[in-house]
Amino acid sequence: MTAGFKKSAMGRTVLGRFPASHPRGSWPAEKFAAVQRRKGTDARVVMDLPSDSFLVISEHGTR
């Protein structure tokens, strides 16, 4: 897992990055996102196809 808080121009922050090739699939990313949600962060898991990674992101602003 690569953790870090990187803001993008689209109002999203990448909280963590997990390789899609992990033997447990998205489970590590889902577990990390659940921990972030328990801490009060609106976190969700998305797939980044170009990097073949699961990203845990938090969106900012209004929808």
Image (cartoon, grey):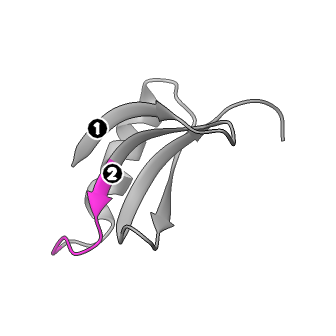
Magenta span of residues: 17-23
- Does 45 appear above or below 43? below
Identify the residue under disc 2: 17
Q: Tell me the amino acid under the disc marked 1.
A: Ala
Label 2 with label 1: CB-CB less than 8 Å: yes
Secondary element at image label 2: strand
* Horizontal side, residue 16 vs residue 10: left or right: left
Q: Position of residue 12 (x, y in %)?
A: 60, 39
For the point 24% across and 44% down, the residue is 2
Q: Is residue 57 or residue 24 the one in the foreground?
A: 57
Viewer-closest of 35 and 20: 20
Q: Nearer the viewer, residue 63 or 7?
A: 7
Q: Is residue 62 left or right of residue 28?
A: right
The quarter in which the C terminus is drawn is: top right
Task: Say if 36 sits above or below 27 in the image.
Answer: above
Q: Which residue is mark 1?
A: 3
